[in-house]
Structures are given as C-alpha cells and as structure tokens.
Image (cartoon, rainbow, N blue to C red):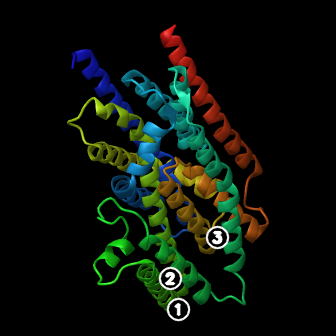
Amino acid sequence: MDPATILLFVVAAVSSLFMAWVIGAGSSGATPFAPAVGANAIGTMRAAFVVGILGFAGAVTQGASVSEAVGRDLIQGVTLPVSSVIVVLLIGAGLMAIGISTGYPIATAFTVTGSVIGVGLALGGDPAWAKYVEVGAVWLLTPFVGGGLAYAIASVLPRPDVPERDSVPVLAGFVGAVVANLEFAFFERGTLVATSAGALPLEGPVVAGALTLGAGVLAALVVRWDVARDKAGGLRRFLLVLGGLVAFSAGASQVGLAVGPLLPLLDEVSMVSPIVVLLGGGVGILVGSWTGAPRMIKAVSQEYASLGPRRSIATLVPSFLIAQTAVLLGVPVSFNEIIVSAVIGAGLAVGGGAGVSPRKLGVTVFAWIGSFALAFGLGYGAILLANA
C-alpha cells in the first residue's frame, strides 16, 4: 500500500473518531439522561459521565448491526473509496458540530444517512429502495409511536385510581422482559433468554417464554418493593435505570453512524478487525460524552419541557423500546427525534403542552428535515465537483 493511500486511511480513521466525539457530545451523550436531569434525579456532569460509560458498552456489544447498515446497505453497486468516506464523515460531523454550538439538536442519523446516499449516488451507485423504505418508516413512525406511548403512560401514572406501586412495577416488568431478550455480541446464542434456555435440559418457545416472563416478574417485584418502601426514591432509581438503558442503546445505535462508513474499507485492510473499529468508535463516544455533552443535556432537559419523575419515566420507556427496535432492524435512528417526541407526548398528557416551546419545536423539526437535505446535497455536490 503506497504512502498516499495510507495517509488517506489515517485521515478517514481520524474523521471517524471526530464523528464519534461529536455523537457523544450531541445526540448519544445528551439525550438519554436529559429527562432524568430535567426531573432533578441526577446532576448534569454526573449524567454525562455515566452516559459515556454506558454508551461505550452499547457500542461494543450491540453496535455491529447499525454499522453494517450504514456501511453496506444504503447504496448498491458501488463501494465508497477512502476519499468519499472522509467526505461523508466530515459532512456529518460538521453539521452536528453546528447543532452543538447553537444548542439545537441536529439529527446525526439524518446527516450521515443523507451524506452516504448523496455520495454513493454521485459515484454511480444504485438506490437501495428496500432499505430506504425501512429507514423512512422508522423515522416517520417514531414521533407518533414514541409520542403516543409517552402520552399514554404519562396519562396513567398520576391517576389516583392507579397507584404507582402497581403502575410503575408493570412498566418495570415489561422493560425487564425486553432486556432479557436483547441481542449481545458476547452471548453465543444472542440473548440472555436464549443462552439460559440452551443451558437447560428442555428448549423451545415455551421455555423461552417462561424465562422471559420470569425476568419481567423479577424486575416488577424489585421495583414494587423499592417504590413501596420509598416512593420518591424508588421512582428516581427506576428513572435512572431507564436512563442507563437508553444511554446503552444510544451507543449501540449511534456508533454505526461514526464507524459504519469505514467497514467497506476493511476489505482492503484485512489486519484490522471490525471489533477494533467498534472499540475506537466507542472510545470516541465516551470522550465526547464526558467533554461536550453537558451543553446539549441542558438544552434538551430545560428548554423543551419541565420534566418531573413521572413524565420522565413516560419519556424514557418508549425511547428505550424504539431504540432497541432500530438496533434489531439495523436502522440508523435519531435519538434527538426519539427523545424530543416522547418529551412532547408526555408533556401534552400532563400539562396540555404548556411546558413545550412551539418555537423550539418548530426550529428543531426544520433542522431535522433540513439536515438530511443539506447533507445529501453537500455529499452529492462534493463528489461531482471532485470528479469534474
């Protein structure tokens, strides 16, 4: 490999690390714990510290799915060369950096996806229509599903005829059942349930269902006991667990936006393993969360709505479910979109939207749409100019 090519690979790797840092400082680092910070369950700096560690763990153990989608599934018939990968990463990171500096959450998934598609089409690649339909469906449904679930949960939690010692454990049981079925790279059979079932004399859907039910019941009983003995403290601790799960899921999803474009390049550099790339992306997210996330945490937690513990729980439960669904499908998804939609849904249920800034919401939605279009145009135009 000649020195010029080696230099391009180094620049691509540095660009990927910069992108990972921006993700940690922005969407992945800020949004998962923003509702908990808004509810005064955890301080801003401590939230940034914890979310960095959990984001790193999610990136390493669950990050391969979205990374493959971003790196190989968005364009058909062409492999992005090193120079084009650099263009993709710099466009995505640059637009994200603008969002961080202005306090408006630019959607990382929109910028990276738009730039990958724009660059790929300019290089003569074919559109991956099936993947676009899948990605578009998740993006369009997220505000309605996330906001709707948050609205439903927030409508139930404060009702006097539904005691929190019953409603919150039900939510905890559902979350516990989902966690038991998450796929992890270090499990031989993928999930905790499947691995546990494999160690038993009997296997099959009945055994898996029983283990899932057991995990849910155990989680519900623990939370019920905690809420019964200390209502305020129990709600706060459950809220922090939810924030941790969302932070973990953010790392699993968002790392693919930073390292996914590098994966096709690994075919030319066989001595570098994909797990090494994921580790590098995880470290970038970790450092970004620790050094740059506090500003965005404050923006999301304080400027969009005034969140209490119940509203924050209503926000984080659907956020966790949508995030893990996206990881399972291998779809790049915006955590800003997920969290903000859920915050608004919970706010409408509790205060009729009084705590939500219409101007902030409008600017944010415009930024989401505009970031995809701008990233696509910049990527497409940059390649056309380079080849002119």
Any mark on residue 228, and which?
1
Please give the label number shown on residue 305: none
Which mark is first along the chain, 3 or 1? 1
Dot 2 or dot 1, earlier in sequence: 1
How many angstroms separate mark 3 from mark 2 (CA)?
15 Å
How many marks are shown on the rendered structure? 3
Q: Mark 3 is on which residue type?
A: Arg
Asked if the residues shown at circle 2 and circle 1 are in contact, with their CB atoms under 8 angstroms apart, the answer is yes
Q: Residues within 10 Å of mark 1 (few under 14, many from 20)?
A: some
Crowd around label 3: few <14 · some 14–19 · many ≥20 (10 Å): many
Q: Amino acid at mark 2?
A: Gly
As measured in the structure, the alpha-carbon distance from the residue carrying label 1 to the one carrying label 3 is 19 Å
Residue 81 in percent (x, y) is at 39, 23
Q: Is residue 100 visible?
A: yes
Q: Is residue 213 above or below residue 145?
A: below
User: Looking at numbered disc 1 in the image, what kind of residue is underneath it?
Assistant: Ala
Q: Nearer the viewer, residue 14 or 87?
A: 87
Q: Which residue is mark 2?
A: 234
For residue 83, above or below residue 143: above
Question: Which residue is denoted by mark 3 in the rendering?
Answer: 311
Q: Which residue is located at x 48 percent, y 34 percent?
A: 93
